[in-house]
Amino acid sequence: MNDVVKMGKCGCVSTGIWLVQGDTRSHVLRIHVPRMEGGGDLKDLGWISKITNEAGVGDVDVPVTGSVVIDERTIAFDWLIHGVATAVPGKTIFSVEGVDETSDGKPIIWRSDSAMMYIRENHEATPSEEAETELGELQKMIVYVNGELENVIAAGEMARSAATHQPIIGGNGNWFLWDIEKGIYVDSGTTATGSGDGSGSVVNLTFDDTLKYDELGRLSVNTATAVDENNDLPITAAAVFVAVGNINSLLSTI
């Protein structure tokens, strides 16, 4: 759950915000300001966060895109904390400011009282050049694994679905193919059988890259044997097993 700070003119209310020096874009602060203030409606104002850290360095930041929510009493938005706010240990003071202008170009400004967050000192260790390179590669791999694991699992589910739902002949004599997205068999519109006496018309089947038809008359699914972002074919269970095994091996080194 995100920390919430209620910003106003006479003090700010929060549960106490503790971060560590160097925390970057890993902590979201939910800020609430009153919508109606001094007889005016603040709903059309644009918002910024103003920050000054323990070293006296200042900065400004804007809310997370799409995070602004307005109801009858409150305006709420998210601030993704980074940069100056956590650069040095100690107290970081922050406030918010809403700005707009009148129809004739005069400024409208609403400013809150200040609030505070506490930045703990980070234990710094300087790695050797070799270790720094290894750490950099490991961090890249962690990001890759987090992004690709869901895709690998989804590909495995598609492969399992395709393997267990081979094409069938429907009651109307047409080939019915399994639709992975819908989870049902759908009519391909292609006739699968003749009359049985050799008088049936020749059927010219047309397939895309996902199906194949061999010389024995067997219809099967083309599959991918490795994870590849440019390959749209269903992946085999064996390939999924290898990919997941590689991920587990990498995670065990972290």
Image: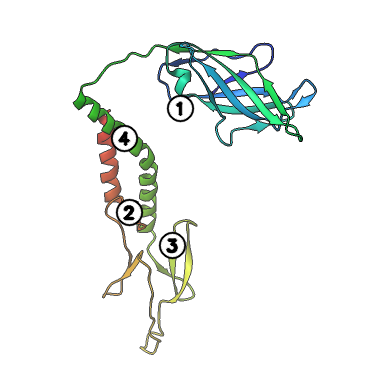
Q: Secondary structure at mark 3?
A: strand
Q: Residues within 10 Å of mark 2 (few under 14, many from 20)?
A: many
Q: Secondary structure at mark 1?
A: loop
**Residue denoted by label 3:** 178
Q: Quadrant of residue 109?
A: top right
Q: Mark 3: which amino acid?
A: Trp
Mark toward the start of the polypeptide (4 vs 3):
4
Q: Mark 1: which amino acid?
A: Arg
Residue occupying the far right of the picture: 39
Camera-side residue: 99 or 91? 99
Q: Secondary structure at mark 2?
A: loop
User: What distance separates the C-alpha of mark 3 from that of mark 1?
Assistant: 43 Å
User: What distance separates the C-alpha of mark 4 from that of mark 2?
Assistant: 25 Å
Give the x, y percent position of residue 192.
Answer: 41, 76
Q: Residue at 34%, 55% (x, y): give it.
A: 230
Name the disc covering residue 140, or none.
Answer: 4
**Residue denoted by label 2:** 235
